[in-house]
């Protein structure tokens, strides 16, 4: 996703062939795969399509991964699940220059298509690159820069294509595949994992693996196409155009697990002190309930009021419980009503359901959440017992 050249690309993509051009016998259609980059939106790698015809002096890249941060509605639409991406068409050497600057390898797979199929492919891309057709609503798992080329190849070859699925011998979920590319102990991964629901936890079909450029590359590497009784390789030729080492998938220096572990120790210490003194730390309880309620409101919003395909059925509501946002203010009062302690008992039950949901694979929870759940559980149990003992005259 070469945002550095976005303004230039917008100008380039306005140009389109006014007449249909027949590609020559020397033309090539290639799948271009780029390594993951440093930015969060680059962690999955990138796929694009190259059209090259030396006789027509064409060497173009068709890139379905273009978006514009400067769009005044970009962030609003992003949150609502209407992420507007576009197909941009520009000289191929810009992509290589960007990859060199970002130190990302680039591999080319030339498709084994006949002249008619290459021309059909080219016509489709040209029509799709027109300003009135170029925009689409991006879905990171089901409609992205890798799935678009996958679908075009499938539409061109139809039942002649036999997709290699050896990469999916050990079945994985979409969440597992995602966490291979973004380290689970990073803030980016943590945010994605708590925002999205259990659709990510179903076992992915081999075709669903192909939302990741790496798996599209692996699938096409050994796929076949049939012509009558003859079976040939889908990829006619493979070339490494830019060579760099893979970037290591690392956790953040100040990671979510470390941050929540520190908070776990801090909350545990305060709770131990409160237990000995038989008192409440109202500000702490307000912060815990308010912040968990705020997360809960976000989960509810993403689930019911956005277009994100993977946001529904999110069991993170068991700890990010939306009503906490309101209940938090009751903890600032001098005396607590008895119902609050029953409410805390209910929150304890919700937290105890989390390992059940996780180990039955209804939904997998990211591991940095463990100390966060632990500190909430410790505090809620303490408050519940304190309230019950006061109600029974124990203090």
Image (cartoon, grey):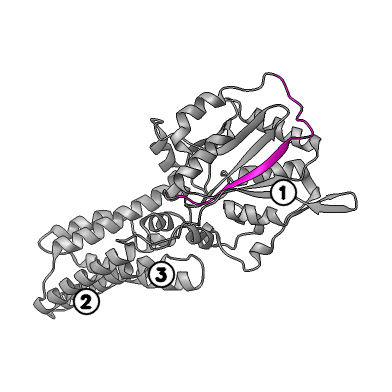
Q: Residues within 10 Å of mark 2 (few under 14, many from 20)?
A: some
Mark 3, residue position: 354
Determine whether label 1 and label 2 are within 8 Å by CB.
no
Extreme bottom residue here? 394
Specify the quadrant that holds the C terminus: bottom left
Residue 291: quadrant of the picture: bottom left
Residue 330: quadrant of the picture: bottom left
Which secondary structure dominates the residues rendered in magenta? loop
Could you tell which of marks 1 and 2 lies nearer the N-terminus?
Answer: 1
Mark 1, residue position: 237
Secondary structure under badge 2?
helix
Residue 385 — which label? 2
Range of magenta residues: 19-37
Instruction: Relative to 68, say whether 201 is above or below.
Output: below
Q: CA distance from mark 3 to mark 1?
A: 49 Å
Residue 376 — which label? none
Instruction: Relative to 136, say whether 38 is above or below.
Output: below
* Residue at the image position 49 percent from the left and 46 percent from the top: 308
Residue 29 drawn in magenta: yes
**x, y (%) of residue 66?**
51, 36
* Residue at the image position 72 percent from the left and 38 percent from the top: 28
Circle nearer the viewer, 3 or 1: 1
**x, y (%) of residue 52?**
68, 35
Extreme top residue here? 18
Q: Residues within 10 Å of mark 3 (few under 14, many from 20)?
A: many
Relative depth, front residue between 215 and 22: 22
Q: Is residue 341 left or right of residue 184?
A: left
């Amino acid at each position: 996703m070469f945002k550095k050249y976005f303004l230039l690309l917008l100008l380039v993509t306005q140009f389109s062939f006014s007449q249909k051009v027949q590609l020559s016998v020397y033309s090539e259609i290639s799948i271009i795969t780029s390594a993951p980059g440093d930015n969060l939106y680059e962690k999955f790698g990138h796929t694009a399509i190259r059209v090259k015809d030396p006789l027509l002096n064409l060497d173009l890249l068709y890139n379905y991964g273009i978006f514009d941060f400067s769009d005044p509605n970009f962030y609003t639409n992003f949150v609502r699940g209407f992420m507007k991406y576009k197909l941009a068409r520009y000289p191929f050497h810009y992509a290589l220059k960007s990859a060199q600057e970002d130190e990302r390898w680039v591999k080319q797979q030339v498709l084994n298509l006949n002249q008619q199929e290459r021309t059909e492919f080219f016509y489709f891309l040209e029509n799709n690159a027109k300003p009135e057709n170029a925009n689409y609503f991006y879905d990171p798992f089901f409609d992205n820069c890798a799935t678009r080329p996958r679908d075009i190849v499938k539409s061109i070859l139809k039942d002649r294509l036999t997709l290699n699925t050896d990469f999916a011998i050990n079945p994985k979920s979409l969440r597992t595949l995602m966490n291979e590319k973004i380290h689970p102990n990073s803030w980016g991964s943590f945010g994605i994992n708590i925002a999205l629901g259990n659709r990510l936890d179903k076992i992915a079909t081999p075709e669903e693996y192909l939302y990741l450029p790496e798996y599209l590359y692996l699938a096409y590497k050994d796929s076949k196409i049939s012509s009558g009784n003859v079976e040939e390789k889908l990829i006619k030729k493979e070339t490494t155009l830019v060579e760099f080492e893979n970037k290591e998938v690392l956790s953040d220096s100040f990671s979510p697990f470390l941050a929540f572990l520190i908070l776990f120790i801090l909350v545990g210490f305060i709770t131990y002190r409160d237990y000995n003194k038989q008192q409440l730390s109202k500000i702490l309880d307000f912060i815990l309930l308010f912040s968990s309620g705020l997360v809960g409101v976000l989960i509810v919003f993403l689930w019911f009021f956005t277009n994100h395909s993977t946001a529904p059925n999110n069991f993170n509501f068991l700890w990010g419980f939306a009503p906490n946002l309101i209940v938090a203010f009751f903890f600032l009062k001098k005396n607590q009503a008895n119902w609050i302690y029953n409410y805390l008992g209910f929150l304890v039950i919700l937290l105890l359901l989390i390992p059940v949901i996780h180990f039955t694979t209804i939904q997998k929870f990211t591991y940095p959440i463990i100390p966060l759940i632990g500190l909430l559980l410790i505090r809620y149990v303490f408050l519940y017992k304190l309230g019950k003992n006061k109600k029974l005259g124990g203090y």
